[in-house]
Image (cartoon, rainbow, N blue to C red):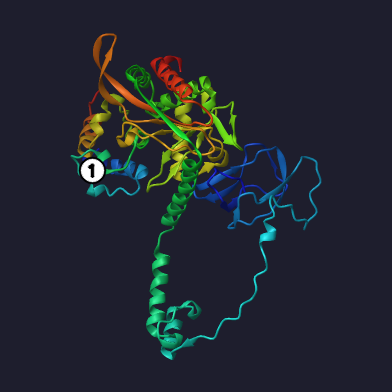
Amino acid sequence: MPSLGADMEAGTLVEWQVKPGQRVKRGDVVAVVETDKGAVEVEIWDDAVVDQLLVEPGTKVPVGKVLARLRAEGEAPAPAGVAPREAEGLGAALSPVQPVRAPRLKVSPVARRRAEELGVDLALVKPSGPEGVISMGDVERSAQGRAASAAKPAALDKLAAMRQAIAAAMAKSKREIPHYYLGTSIDVSTAIGWLEQQNLKRPVTERVLLAALLLRSVAMALKEVPELNGFWVDGAFKPIQAVHLGVAIALRGGGLVAPAIHDADRKTVPQIMHALSDLVTRARGGALRSSELADATVTVTNLGEQGVEAVFGVIYPPQVALVGFGKVVERPWAERGGLYVRRVIHATLCADHRASVGHRGGQFLSALDRCLQEPEKL
Amino acid sequence: MTRDDIRKTLAEALARVAPETDFDALRPERPLRDQLDIDSFDFLNVIVHLHDKLGVDIPEADYAKLATLGGAVDYLETRLAPGHIT
């Protein structure tokens, strides 16, 4: 079971998309796993042949548990019945359950009949009467409680689980990461004007939103300040060469995911728009891939849609930076002795002070500004 | 195409991006963004759906005219009227 983010502890295998004996290549989707972040397509990391599937669909297993065995091309299949080595001694934690003899229940005859009618398990009913005798009222209360919990929609449980996962990651972030925050106003009039001109030439299905231009600019600026792109692991910063931009996507009903646009530094603006569109659609439809959830090297959040002008975010560990954008607003803008009305966006950087210093963070924001003044070069 | 047909297509488009929408409860004169939790992606998807279903290519410059339900119906009715030159 792969870890799809620092906050994941377990996942439920929904289905296998491969069979034993099937050849797979790196990047193929082999299984679907249900997590707090929704259904995720699990990709394989090596070219291989599927040897054995070890977990049945419907089973919830902890992160690190072996789901399947692979073998190299040409290698003999493992003999049947050989248990694979567990990643950690998970098996040892499971001890056989001792059978417990149920205590004899004291139940009034009318309560017993009512329990049969309602299909209530008497062992689960809490007696309220003297000497622990279960009455008809106790049975009926128990049946009502059961109906209420069954009626709770599954969607709410999923949202609650996602809330727990966000809580764990954000609490860890605030506990461990010494955040510092920088912000600056950027004139995006030129960028928006350029985008409008480009979109005039494009059919409706290929129009580019400002978000794609902002993401591309972030990727370019990160190349100049690489200490913001990577992970803080085992007490040290590990820079990552590729820029995988995590994009915070709000889900209907209050959920949040931040899947990655891979290699954003090597994609053109229309390619980023395409990737973003695909990601938003799949995030809201619940079919993200494992690599998208696991390997973002930095996160970008754009809360301008909701009308706020600036975002001061919380870094998603083990990442070391989060870039925020507010909404585009018209503002009086003084420049070279003149006063103009310009379209302005507020960009913020929250960064991990263990990995970078404010001076470098400032250089990142000024690189971002520079990129957005020359949209035709993005 | 009647105004009812246009309303039906708009209802479909909104239901795709915001399934919880109670279309009949929407106030025609109030901005859709105030009544529905939709972002620029959702809005673009609505525009694409209208393009697919009605064959209307709505330029970005006209997006503001679709900010309310009433405005959108009026706009589409004009665009779809026979003899309209796009």
The residue lying furthest to the bottom in this view is A109
Residue A96 in sight from this viewpoint = yes
Taking the view exactly as shown, the residue that stands out farthest to the top is A337
Query: How many callouts does the rendering have?
Result: 1
Is A142 located above or below residue A338 in the figure?
below
SS at badge 1: helix
Question: 10 Å neighbourhood of mark 1: few (<14), some, or many (≥20)?
Answer: few
Of A86 and B54, nearer the camera is A86
Q: In front: A372, or A179?
A: A179
Q: Is residue A354 above or below residue A143?
A: above
Q: Check disc 1 and report the residue beneath it.
A: B4
Q: Position of residue A10 (x, y in %)?
A: 57, 52
Q: Residue A22's quadrant in the figure?
A: top right
**Kind of residue at disc 1:** Asp
The chain to which mark 1 is attached is B
Q: Is residue B50 visible?
A: no
Residue A217 appears at what percent x and percent y? Answer: 45, 22
Q: Is residue B39 above or below residue A108?
A: above
Up-down relation of residue B68 to residue A199 (above or below): below
Residue A186 percent location from the top left of the image: 35, 21
Q: Nearer the viewer, residue A23 or A78?
A: A78
Measuring 37% from the left and 82% from the top, which residue is drawn there? Answer: A137
Q: Residue furthest left?
A: B29
Asked whether, in this view, residue A277 is left or right of residue A16, the answer is left
Residue A355: image x %, image y %? 54, 30
**Residue A285 occupies which quadrant of the picture?**
top left
Residue occupying image coordinates x 26% and y 9%: A337
Image point 41% across, 36% down: which residue?
A: A313
